[in-house]
Image (tube, rainbow, N blue to C red):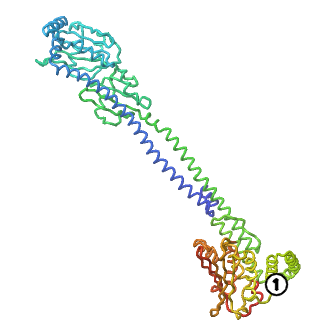
Amino acid sequence: MHIRYIYRNYFKNNLFMRIILFFSVITIVTIITFSYLMFKVMSESAVQRQLDIQKGAVERVSNYFSGKYDSIQSTVREVYRDDVLAVNMSYFLEHPYQDYVNYRLERFYTDNGISSSDMVTFFRGKVDDDPDIRSLMLYSVDQYQLYVFYNYMQQFKIIPTNLARSYIPEVMYQQEGPGVGPSNIWVSRAIETTNTSTYSVRFPVNNTLTLKNIGQLVVYYDTDKVWNSLALYKEDLKGSILVLSQDGSVLFDSTGFYQGKKYPYFEELNTVYDNDELGDDLIATKITHSQGGFTVLSTVPKKELAKTYQGLRNTILLISSVCILFAILIPALFISNFAKRMYNIIRFTRKVRDGDFTTRIADTRDDELGQISKSFNDMLEELNEYIDRVFKAEIKQQQTELVALQARINPHFLYNTLEVIRMRAVSQGAKDVAEMIYSLSVLFKSLVQQKRVYTLKDELEACRLYLELFRIRYKDRFEYEIQAAPELYGQSVVKLSLQPIVENYIVHGIRTDRYDNRLTIQVQEDGDILTVVVQDNGKGIEPDQLAEIREELEREEETGRMFGLRSVHSRLRFLYGPEYGIEIESSPESGTIVIVRYPVREEMEAEAQDV
């Protein structure tokens, strides 16, 4: 009920409010949809980018462990490939250490002082070459002895492991195959290394002749050195990076939470592929090394992944809210202003309906409403002019004639003044100046003289007087010629229809640096048309400018440009019709030809002559 009331009072009869409502709904739905899609794409991209970081970290750790495993495997292969090393290794593990020393001395003398490869020196060198090694151990199955090489000691240590008093033989028996695993607590205690931050890489050692297992090579590595492989990812890493042995023991945990323990989700890892869910809250990435028997695992809680795009979500919400606000507010303000202007037009039309023809719409903008306002204003102007023409024409005509009579001034004082100046020039011997003043005086008198009929002879005389001024001014550099049959002198023409054309040549066409400047005026009768050709050899007109002049002559509205030529053309067209007027032909540096066409008429009303 309340919604219906709002619709009926604010939207039903209000077109602009309906437009705002419709536009707002479309804008909000569009922005929300776009923001959701953008958030979905960008959040998935952020999650994928984080998973790529986790995968890169897993690969680096896997490569690190694989490198250690391959290093020990290469050591064992190196022993097997070298016959002397293989024999020495077998003797070293199958006999007491003192017998091995005596064996080495006998070989030394037998070989005439040439030293063969010593197992102690060989393995001591391996420890020195790899700073990540905590300790290297050789276990003898026959002698129940453990030979230990420490990374901080130059000498190695022999630890007896009697089966009745030690668990080490049992441990070594259970771990016969190669692989990577946790460090055994009994072995660690025996070699006096209780630090759990180590993992082991082991390989069985066999007699190359009998293929009998004679011991094991076990290397303890420092777990803290794994962080060196994670240096590039340490700051961006989420969750934890774990290294698991074949039985699920945690060899390395970046968080330290599962270090040295069994991983609780180890059984579920068999169903996890490269990127998959582990449990209810973890995203796992794993790489399994089949030969080494270890698995490198990255686990990231879903909440941690959500944090990677939490800031993005807040930013998108903020931007979307601002966009919705501006997308609604700005059009609403614009439409409100549009509605206000429309209501002003409605109020204006009501005033006109009530008979107020003096009102105007004060809207000068160039948009549609501005054009409507201008059209209404122009319509009222024309309406008022029509009323004036129909109802007030006679009174207006009488007032105009009265004003013209009051404004008429007798110009004789100007002629007298010019005559005084001319006589002064004659007395001073300046005959050319006197001639110019005389021509100007006569020209001015002919222009201001009121005549009922203005003939071709009057217009040609005005042109002659004007050209005579400049002939005297330029002396031998300019000449003119007027050719007209005497029987054409009585033809009625428009006043000042040729003089502006001649003046245009003097102002724009004459070349004062030449001595052959010439202008010719030819008058001829062609049927019902009187044609006057004004030709010069002046500067001429460029094609672009000539096209612009022709276009300007044909314009219906006055622009204020080329006033003289356009005035002549417009008056002839207005008085006689479209077939009359002026035409212009010109070429640069070749001169200009202006053709003026009049009707052949002996008389014309004085009123028409003054148009």
**Residue linked to disc 1:** 449
Decide if residue 186 is in sight here: no
Residue 430 to residue 236: above or below = below
Quadrant of the drawing holding the N terminus: bottom right
Nearer to me, 519 or 330: 519
Residue 138 to residue 430: above or below = above
**Please, which residue is most extreme toward the left here?**
210
Percent position of residue 116, x then y: 18, 13
Nearer to me, 580 or 313: 580
Q: Secondary structure at mark 1?
A: loop
Looking at the rendering, which quadrant does residue 196 occupy?
Answer: top left
Percent position of residue 4, x then y: 60, 58
Nearer to me, 244 or 303: 244
Percent position of residue 368, x then y: 63, 66
Decide if residue 532 is in sight here: yes
Looking at the rendering, which quadrant does residue 511 occupy?
Answer: bottom right
Q: Residues within 10 Å of mark 1 (few under 14, many from 20)?
A: few
Nearer to me, 566 or 298: 566
Quadrant of the drawing holding the C terminus: bottom right
Horizontally, residue 499 falls left or right of residue 171, namely right
Residue 242 to residue 440: above or below = above
Percent position of residue 96, x then y: 18, 7
Looking at the rendering, which quadrant does residue 163 occupy?
Answer: top left
- Count of marks, rendered view: 1
Horizontally, residue 130 falls left or right of residue 177, namely right
Please state which amino acid type lies under the numbered disc 1.
Answer: Gln
Residue 132 to residue 50: above or below = above
